[in-house]
Image: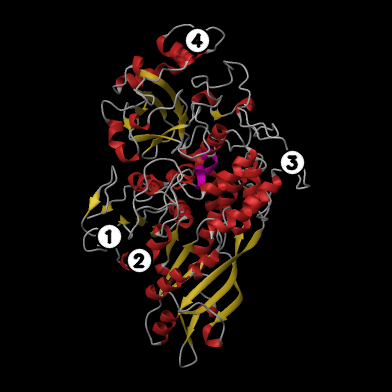
């Protein structure tokens, strides 16, 4: 479904980027934008490839807030730069940042430790190192080149990616050394960085004024075993406080919980017994609405202005009028038969749909079959911000003005609130609807589900955003997260979906390096709706107003839509153990052979190989992303986990592979 939507989006984008769709075209200058003065004091001059590199850098932390120079923001094909005020206010950088720089020439990938060799980053000969400046502790990480075909070979982005979420309000030092060019020659530092490192002068530059600022970076790296004179590039950055990132969403959640549970009303009922055309195994499908306070300027999905959070003079979210949000409830025939025969009410699950989809995914074949097996009622609503209705707004941000992109992540705040509100309603006002009751032979009716059993289940985007819901939900304990992960920018640059999204962005922002920078910088906007922000608080140390969770993570080898790497980072950060024996054992995960409260299970599908490491086109589609959720072993594991006293138990005889 995603590819079809992106084809349509590309058609719209090609019209928009042609400026008016009137048949006229725009002359394209494909040359690299003029970099301006050699050493602009507003830029981070360590990396001469671009004003904003290396990213993120405390060069852009001004008076306690991230502030980007106007001349450093990427320009579109018309010469218009992204608005320097487009990002939300933060007192530091996101907690799972995309670290990016450029060397000349690009290093031989063999001199980098990739995602399959994370342990090397902690060793004495590591070429890429991240160090907590205060504690001296090294952060496990990996390094990789941007391998997408549209990169400029003279300016290839080099990414350093933390293998776990970083600590908030913490300064980190990043160092690269021992980088070798193809052919074996050592890569040298830039003139600016060499002058900084070797404490030599550099005419007409700001290097003298930066020495004290970066002294602690060199000291931290040296103490961690990386001598100053070996460094090819190094820099420092400070992460944001959790309050700076989560404050809006937590405030909206707390305000929601202070209001009465919104009303729940039925708008239509489809009933198999009445002859309505329903998917096989479905007894009844109920369409309705539930009421939620609106924290946005407006409810129109296509409007970037209305998608922004409505704020007071101090910048805090403001509650507006209530809006009616559509929901769908699916009741399988197996559940009807069970309750009609005198059995106990079934389970109830709130389901999260995939990227740019809708609540109708809950009636897809795999889900109707699974609901039938579970004898469960499935509730679903659309992810405001990343649902079908949001596509046109998202395309305009990518194809016309990236300054409007944060409207997507702000509208996702409302999407999270809507799911929290649906959970509340499913336990109260919706549970009382007669249309959700099962008729009995004596003319009475019985509840179809027990509200106390409510759990969350999401796949793909529904898993990615479900991790955020798990971080802030007040009382739902069990979350099943299929083929998801954390780190939106990292996920996108490893996904087959980037062919479409990246293609749209290419039509307007023609400089390949600036496109990569936009993806990296967007992490500041993604952070409040990225599960990495909440991952350390899911199983232990829950955020105020939340509870400790039980998590079941399920992924499959060779997923071209959401990289397995994104799930590995989530599991490491949250402390989710790997069920063993496993088809693979990622770095840094605890393992368990015994039933556990939470767990990660990795499946292998017939004929599907692992994707080579790196940020690149993952290749043609495989069955993995859609198939994991259909596997009998995966269903059995979920069934056990969602039981009242359920746990995670390895569902296979040996590794979960075709053999």
In the rendered image, which residue does mark 4 sit on? 208
Is residue 528 located in the magenta-colored stretch of the structure?
A: yes
Residue 410: give x, y in percent of width and height.
59, 47
In what element is the residue under mark 3? loop
In the rendered image, which residue does mark 3 sit on? 25
Whether residue 483 sits left or right of residue 415 in the image: it is left
Using the rendered view, name the quadrant where residue 642 is placed: bottom left
**Marks 4 and 3, how far apart at CA:** 47 Å
The stretch in magenta equals: 523-529
What's the colour scheme? secondary structure
Mark whose residue sits in front, 3 or 1? 3
The image's mark for residue 656 is: 1
Q: Which of marks 3 and 1 is nearer the N terminus?
A: 3
Mark whose residue sits in front, 3 or 2? 3
Q: Which of marks 4 and 3 is nearer the N terminus?
A: 3
Q: Which of marks 3 and 2 is nearer the N terminus?
A: 3
In the rendered image, which residue does mark 2 sit on? 631
Residue 83: give x, y in percent of width and height.
65, 34
**Marks 4 and 1, how far apart at CA:** 58 Å
Pointer 2: residues within 10 angstroms few (<14), some, or many (20+)? some
């Amino acid at each position: 479904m995603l590819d079809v939507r992106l084809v349509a989006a590309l058609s719209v984008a090609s019209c928009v980027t042609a400026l008016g769709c009137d048949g006229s075209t725009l002359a394209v200058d494909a040359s690299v934008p003029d970099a301006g003065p050699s050493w602009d004091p507003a830029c981070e001059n360590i990396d001469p490839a671009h004003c904003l590199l290396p990213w993120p850098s405390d060069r852009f932390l001004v008076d306690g807030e991230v502030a980007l120079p106007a001349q450093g923001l990427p320009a579109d094909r018309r010469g218009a730069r992204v608005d320097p005020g487009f990002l939300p206010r933060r007192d530091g950088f996101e907690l799972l940042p995309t670290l990016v720089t450029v060397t000349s020439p690009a290093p031989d990938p063999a001199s980098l430790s990739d995602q399959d060799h994370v342990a090397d980053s902690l060793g004495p000969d590591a070429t890429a190192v991240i160090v907590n400046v205060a504690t001296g502790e090294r952060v496990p990480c990996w390094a990789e080149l941007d391998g997408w075909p549209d990169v400029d070979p003279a300016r290839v982005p080099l990414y350093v990616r933390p293998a776990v979420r970083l600590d908030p309000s913490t300064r980190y030092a990043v160092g690269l050394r021992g980088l070798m060019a193809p052919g074996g020659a050592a890569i040298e530092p830039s003139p600016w960085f060499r002058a900084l490192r070797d404490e030599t002068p550099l005419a007409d530059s700001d290097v003298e004024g930066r020495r004290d600022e970066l002294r602690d970076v060199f000291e931290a790296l040296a103490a961690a075993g990386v001598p100053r004179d070996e460094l090819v590039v190094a820099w420092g950055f400070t992460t944001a406080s959790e309050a700076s990132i989560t404050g809006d969403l937590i405030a909206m959640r707390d305000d929601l919980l202070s209001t009465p549970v919104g009303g729940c009303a039925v708008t239509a009922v489809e009933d198999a017994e009445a002859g309505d055309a329903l998917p096989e195994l479905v007894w009844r499908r109920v369409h309705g609405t539930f009421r939620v306070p609106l924290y946005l300027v407006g409810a129109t999905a296509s409007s970037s202005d209305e998608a922004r959070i409505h704020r007071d003079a101090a910048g805090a979210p403001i509650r507006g009028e209530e809006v009616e949000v559509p929901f769908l409830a699916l009741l399988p025939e197996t559940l009807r038969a069970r309750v009609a025969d005198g059995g106990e009410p079934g389970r109830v699950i709130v389901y999260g749909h995939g990227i740019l989809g809708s609540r109708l995914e809950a009636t897809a074949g795999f889900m109707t079959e699974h609901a039938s097996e579970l004898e469960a009622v499935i509730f679903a609503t659309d992810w405001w911000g990343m649902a079908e209705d949001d596509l046109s707004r998202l395309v305009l941000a990518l194809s016309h003005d990236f300054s409007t992109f944060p409207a997507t992540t702000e509208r996702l705040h409302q999407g999270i609130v809507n799911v929290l509100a649906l959970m509340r309603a499913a336990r109260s006002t919706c549970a009382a609807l007669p249309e959700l009751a099962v008729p009995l032979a004596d003319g009475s009716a019985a509840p179809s589900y027990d509200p106390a059993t409510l759990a969350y289940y999401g796949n793909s985007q529904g898993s990615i955003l479900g991790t955020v819901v798990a971080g802030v939900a007040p009382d739902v304990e069990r979350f099943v997260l299929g083929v998801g992960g954390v780190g939106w920018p990292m996920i996108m640059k490893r996904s087959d979906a980037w062919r479409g999204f990246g293609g749209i962005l290419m039509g307007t922002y023609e400089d390949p390096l600036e496109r990569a920078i936009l993806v990296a910088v967007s992490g500041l906007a993604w952070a409040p709706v990225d599960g990495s922000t909440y991952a350390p608080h899911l199983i232990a140390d829950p955020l105020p107003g939340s509870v400790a969770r039980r998590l079941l993570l399920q992924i499959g080898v060779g997923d071209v839509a959401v990289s397995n790497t994104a799930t590995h980072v989530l599991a490491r950060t949250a402390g989710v153990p790997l069920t063993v024996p496993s088809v693979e054992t990622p770095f840094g995960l605890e393992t368990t052979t015994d039933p556990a409260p939470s767990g990660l299970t990795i499946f292998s599908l017939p004929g599907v190989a692992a994707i080579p490491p790196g940020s690149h086109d993952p290749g043609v589609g495989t069955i993995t992303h859609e198939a994991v959720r259909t596997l009998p072993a995966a269903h059995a594991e979920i069934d056990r986990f969602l039981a009242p006293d359920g746990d995670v138990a390895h569902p296979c005889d040996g590794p979960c592979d075709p053999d």
